[in-house]
Image (spheres, rainbow, N blue to C red):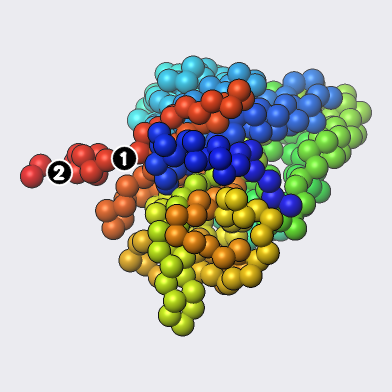
């Protein structure tokens, strides 16, 4: 059962000031989830979630998450600037980039970010130009040692990370070139709902950390389990049990790190989807109903506001406000206005009968929703609103205007 942190009358009040379409984020839900995650790892000597900024790159959200104790995971200079502006700097930033230009490494170094390198050649690429930072980490790609999942694909086919052999060479090289403190990272899943997948990943990293200490005499400071924690997009999906994941990883830590007498490791995550995904909603108005070979409901939003359904065929649940308990009597394709036939939020979806002017809410749009927005076909990105814990609503990003769209042209 999918629920909402607002009802029809609340949205009717909001649209008097902020017309649809807009994204709205639920501060209370987001904070409670952040606390659940931290609690699940309370056994750890140290735990830190570096929120993957790309999920919803808004400084207001970053500030809320930073208040809850999260750092930021960045992979571009814009994301670094955003974190900096939100007051997240130094080792609170994990710079997990790939195919990175030196100018971006330079900015990351200026901020004091943790460098998480995607390739062995980046050691000299950085060393020869700007010098290595003291603290760095490598992204491990386990290749054939680990099965993949649908979005990232199988690790052998993924462009990310270092092979196992390269990893050992990389620590040696980095140490010779001035690296002093080290971490280890991997990220091999995306939107994964099987909790044991993350426990397996942790075990793999703990074993590898032990081997690195044994073979190279390097004590790692942290292991970073990456992101990829999935969320229940479909009403029948079960959310990940964070307490289960945390406690199972705790057992593995005891077995593989503590019992081997290794130095304690900080446990890091760089989750994005789990942090904002379920707490963001795209609110639109139904503006057209069209009956041809199928029944279509046209919204005032389009895939420029949320492209996951068009891009991956992703399911996003839809609620028609005020009709939460009405029977699902009508089968619709719910569409946007782009001149692309894949601009559909839902295909053959059973919904209550929709009338023009109905407010339609698309769930789980808080990650990779507004963030993936684009301007193709002259579509403007919508505003982002924040539903505060006290029920008040704040605009945290205004909607784009035609002037924004034309800003790079000189007529
Ligand atoms: C996208 C990304 C994440 C976050 O992934 P989620 O699936 O949102 O948890 C973390 N790290 C890196 C390097 C990423 O590219």
Q: Residue at x 66, y 33 (%)?
A: 29
Q: Nearer the viewer, residue 140 or 402?
A: 402
Instruction: Name the residue at 63% across, 60% down.
Output: 150
The answer to whether 167 appears left or right of 374 in the picture is right
Crowding near the residue tagged with mark 1, few <14, some 14–19, many ≥20 C-alpha atoms within 10 Å: some
Looking at the image, which is closer to me, 95 or 212? Answer: 95
- For the residue pair 320 and 306, the one nearer the viewer reads as 320
Q: Which residue is mark 2?
A: 409
Which sits earlier in the primary sequence, circle 1 or circle 2? 1
In three-dimensional space, the C-alpha distance between marks 1 and 2, rounded to whole angstroms, equals: 16 Å
- Using the image, determine if residue 363 lies above or below residue 257: below
Residue appearing at x 81%, y 48% in the figure: 196
Q: Which mark is residue 257?
A: none
Rendered location of residue 283, percent (x, y): 49, 47
Q: Is disc 2 placed on a helix, strand or loop? A: loop
Q: Is residue 56 visible?
A: no
Q: Disc 1, disc 2: CB below 8 Å?
A: no
Q: Tell me if residue 392 can be seen.
A: yes
Query: Which of label 1 and label 2 is nearer to you?
Result: 1
Mark 2 vs ligand 1: CB under 8 Å?
no
The residue at which mark 1 appears reads as 400
Which image quadrant: the C terminus? top left
Q: Where is residue 61? Give x, y as percent.
A: 53, 28
Q: Position of residue 151 (x, y in %)?
A: 59, 57
- Residue displayed at 36% across by 34% down: 398
Quadrant for residue 366, please give it.
top right
Q: Secondary structure at mark 1?
A: loop
Few, some or many residues within 10 Å of mark 2 (<14, 14–19, 20+): few
């Amino acid at each position: 059962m999918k629920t909402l942190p607002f009802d029809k009358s609340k949205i009717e009040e909001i649209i008097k000031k902020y017309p649809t379409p807009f994204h709205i984020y639920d501060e209370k839900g987001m904070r409670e989830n952040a606390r659940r995650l931290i609690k699940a790892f309370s056994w750890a000597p140290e735990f830190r979630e570096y929120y993957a900024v790309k999920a919803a790159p808004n400084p207001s959200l970053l500030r809320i998450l930073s208040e809850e104790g999260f750092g930021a995971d960045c992979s571009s200079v814009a994301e670094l600037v955003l974190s900096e502006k939100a007051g997240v700097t130094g080792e609170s930033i994990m710079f997990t980039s790939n195919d990175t230009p030196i100018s971006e490494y330079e900015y990351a170094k200026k901020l004091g970010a943790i460098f998480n390198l995607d390739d062995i050649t980046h050691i000299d690429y950085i060393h020869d130009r700007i010098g290595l930072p003291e603290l760095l980490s490598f992204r491990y790609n386990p290749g054939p040692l680990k099965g993949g999942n649908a979005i990232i694909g199988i690790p052998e086919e993924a462009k990310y990370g270092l092979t196992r052999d390269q990893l050992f060479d990389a620590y040696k090289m980095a140490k010779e070139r001035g690296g002093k403190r080290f971490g280890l990272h991997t990220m091999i899943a995306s939107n994964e709902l099987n909790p044991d997948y993350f426990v397996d990943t942790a075990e793999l990293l703990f074993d590898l950390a032990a081997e690195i200490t044994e073979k190279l005499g390097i004590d790692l400071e942290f292991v970073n389990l990456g992101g990829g924690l999935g969320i229940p997009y479909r009403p029948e999906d079960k959310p990940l049990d964070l307490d289960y994941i945390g406690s199972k990883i705790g057992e593995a830590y005891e077995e593989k790190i503590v019992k081997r007498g290794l130095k304690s490791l900080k446990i890091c995550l760089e989750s994005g989807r789990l942090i904002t995904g379920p707490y963001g909603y795209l609110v639109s108005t139904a503006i057209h109903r069209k009956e041809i070979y199928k029944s279509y409901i046209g919204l005032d939003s389009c895939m420029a506001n949320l492209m996951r359904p068009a891009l991956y065929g992703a399911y996003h649940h839809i609620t028609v406000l005020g009709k939460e308990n009405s029977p699902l009597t009508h089968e619709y394709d719910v569409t946007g206005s782009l001149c692309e036939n894949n601009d559909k939020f839902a295909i053959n979806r059973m919904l209550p009968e929709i009338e023009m002017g109905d407010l339609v809410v698309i769930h789980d749009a808080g990650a990779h929703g507004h963030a993936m927005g684009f301007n193709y076909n002259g579509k403007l990105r919508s505003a982002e609103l924040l539903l505060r814990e006290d029920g008040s609503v704040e605009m945290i990003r205004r909607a784009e205007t035609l002037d924004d769209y034309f800003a790079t042209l000189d007529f």
